[in-house]
Image (tube, grey):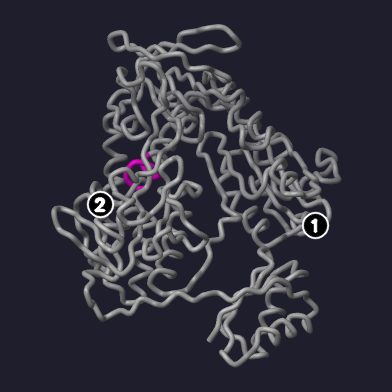
Amino acid sequence: MKKYRVKIIGMTCTGCEEHVAVALENMGAKEIEVDFRREEAVFELPNDVEVERAKKAISDAEYQPGETEEVQQQETVQLGDEGDYDYDYIIIGSGGASFSSAIEAAKYGANVAIIERGTVGGTCVNIGCVPSKTLLRAGEINHIAKNNPFVGLHTSAGNVDLTPLIKQKNDLVTDLRNSKYIDLIDDYGFKLIKGEAKFVDEKTVEVNGMQLSAKRFLIATGASPAVPKILGIEEVDYLTSTSLLELKQVPKRLTVIGSGYIGMELGQLFHHLGSEVTLMQRSPRLLKEYDPEVSEAITQALTEQGINLVTGATFDRVEQDGEIKKVYVTVDGRTKVVESDQLLVATGRKPNTTTLNLEAAGVEVGSRGEIMIDEYSKTTNSSIYAAGDVTLVPQFVYVAAYQGGIAAGNAIGGLNKKLNLEVVPGVTFTAPAIATVGLTEQQAKEKGYEVKTSVLPLDAVPRALVNRETTGVFKLVADAKTMKIIGAHVVAENAGEVIYAATLAVKFGLTVEDLRETMAPYLTMAEGLKLAALTFDKDVSKLSCCAG
């Protein structure tokens, strides 16, 4: 069998995909994958069947076949024959990408080893998503107790006892680490090797003085907090996103250098727990890569809550005076000093690659130390793959898990399946939350789209009115020619829950009219998507409840 990829012009929906797939199946094609968004079909044909027959079938189905390429199929790893190799698949790292990849490889009967130098489970369960989000929820409850918006309802909150709260967080982390990671090692029969791995050559790693070889490797070593070059930073007892979550006492004052999603989430967390918080950043506006309406909404929300924002800052130096940390910055030509009891540095993350000796394996890295991969998640060494934060893909655990699964299918199963990260939702768990998917208005214009947008303030959403929390926004970005939704951006309570519906709309090419014609439950935040769709050509303030 030979495998081909054919570009196809004219597909607009999943129905088109089915039409093309049926046409190809009827002419004898196998293993057919059709994707209207990528405008292509991938399929296999018997060696004696010319690809022109497939192109004619596509044309007869009233679609236009374009550029054609033969896909070189990767040889499936032959399992059950150890040969000169210790393992079929060695995975370095033990986070979301690693376990997803190991489980996928196990489907092919692979003999898998996982090498981990630290705590099993990676960033998300140990020091990232799980611990931060459970503490964020605690902070929200404390904040609401002190600031509830309902008259006649008398609530209050005392000082936070952080020690038992951190213990409760750690107990949850331990439970999930065991159930979602450690217990699976025996269930699937993986070999766990504790120690630090470094490559000796293209097929061999050394760990604990042992040399281990494998037919294929996956590097999934994640990333760590990055520290900016600021004069004096090395002499200051600063915190990272990891150490902050182990504090036993709420600081009276907390300064955060960096106002990306990590800085905002953790800064707001400690504000809600009782700290006086200052967020500082170099950029003149928060979340500069997002739509301006998103930046404006979250800036308004944080300011209303009493968080101090310092934007457009040049960091001159940092120093420590006893227990007090001092950050010297220049803003609009004026120098100011911000003092605090604790200093959090949250200026991004760097890939964990420095100890791997990748040069010996023929694996190239980029300017930030990230592992360079192709569209199949393969590195510059054809036997070594990489997945997750170490490759600087969008740094979400679900992206890492997806990428790890693709890597195993290609490395062990010989699938030659491409990564598709065109529609990746992202959530920042502030209050209100920020959720986005697809293109911003600016990105869409840069890609050549003629764009039409709608912007719906949160005070036009009934759910927000009854919650008495109306700072936020819904924004939809559409292709003006087809009116397909190509981007959705939300600042609202439960925005992370809302964005999944928007993700489906973007992924499957739904139009503004599709959203308008779909019933949305009244008094849900998700109704904001329908109202935003109506806003393209209606004033929703002139509509009755539930009216379209």
For mark 2, give the secondary structure: strand
Q: Quadrant of residue 269?
A: top left
Answer whether residue 326 is magenta in the image. no
Relative to the observer, which residue lies in front, 317 or 303? 317
**Picture coordinates of residue 119 (x, y %)?**
25, 47
Relative to the observer, which residue lies in front, 472 or 486? 486
Q: Amino acid at mark 2?
A: Lys
Checking the image for residue 198, the label placed there is 2
Residue at 51 percent of width and 69 percent of height: 417
**Do we see residue 109 in this rendering?**
yes
What is the chief secondary structure element of the magenta stretch?
Answer: helix
Relative to the observer, which residue lies in front, 124 or 64? 64
Which range is magenta? Answer: 124-131
* Horizontal side, residue 213 vs residue 137: left or right: left
* Horizontal side, residue 75 vs residue 437: left or right: left
* Horizontal side, residue 328 vs residue 531: left or right: left
Checking the image for residue 513, the label placed there is 1
**Do we see residue 176 in this rendering?**
no
Residue at 63 percent of width and 58 percent of height: 504
Q: Amino acid at mark 1?
A: Glu
**Picture coordinates of residue 533 (x, y %)?**
77, 49
> How many residues crowd around disc 2 within 10 Å: few (fewer than 14), some, or many (20 or more)?
many
**Picture coordinates of residue 303 (x, y %)?**
58, 21
